Image: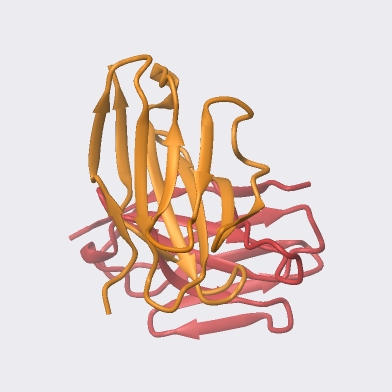
Amino acid sequence: QQQVKQSPQSLIVQKGGISIINCAYENTAFDYFPWYQQFPGKGPALLIAIRPDVSEKKEGRFTISFNKSAKQFSLHIMDSQPGDSATYFCAANKGSSNTGKLIFGQGTTLQVKP
Amino acid sequence: NAGVMQNPRHLVRRRGQEARLRCSPMKGHSHVYWYRQLPEEGLKFMVYLQKENIIDESGMPKERFSAEFPKEGPSILRIQQVVRGDSAAYFCASSSQIGDGYTFGSGTRLTVV
């Protein structure tokens, strides 16, 4: 119940294309869903996050779509650029709990070809 | 305003030695979290601390691992009698509120030889 399953494991997209990464969760108590971007040798950096009271959130070229009934959420990267090549992690958290523990997906390695 | 500072960036230890990993949270952040990342895997929660208190250590191995966040100074993750399986990247994150707006450090890459 604590797992977050992420797919695909790796993704290759042409420059200008749309990158889509999917995550599914089991625990209906989760109420905070962030996405992190990690470059080699660096720590994860918060990209965008959503709470279940909205079905979509957009920040620049990055959009989270959230389907509460299906317990799924996805990251869409529009107009993908070579600089977006990185590993992306989804995560989930029960914000009302007394701990800040984030449950991470397994990660997706994105390569954007020029 | 410096980010989360972790040191050392790289640490090599022989089997049986002790490893000490340090984390200074962002200014104004009182919540510190430690995560471990094995090669080709996601981050696994280890421990959540506030000043002088361990709040959640449900992800910490029962033996050899300990963490502290003293009133003064950085948070320390200590691994005693390291084994090859401890080789991983260890990330620290801090936040000003519980579970929200984490900022991660660049990590310490521990190699046990």
Query: Which chain is displayed in orange in the rendered image?
Result: B
Residue B7, placed above or below residue B78: below
Residue B96, placed above or below residue B93: below
Between B61 and A79, the one nearer to me in the picture:
B61
Between A110 and A102, the one nearer to me in the picture:
A102
Instruction: Please report the residue visible at 52 percent of the width from the left and 26 percent of the height from the top.
Output: B64
Left or right, residue B3 beside residue A3? left
Instruction: Please report the residue visible at 30 percent of the width from the left and 54 percent of the height from the top.
Output: B6
Left or right, residue A35 beside residue A32? left
Q: Position of residue B50 (x, y in %)?
A: 57, 63
Query: Which chain is displayed in red in the rendered image?
Result: A
Q: Position of residue A47 (x, y in %)?
A: 43, 71
Q: Position of residue A13 (x, y in %)?
A: 33, 57
Residue with the most extreme front position: B72
Q: Position of residue A50 (x, y in %)?
A: 60, 76
Q: Quadrant of residue B113?
A: top left
Instruction: Please report the residue visible at 44 percent of the width from the left and 43 percent of the height from the top.
Output: B77
Q: Quadrant of residue A80?
A: bottom left
Residue B27 seen in the current view: yes
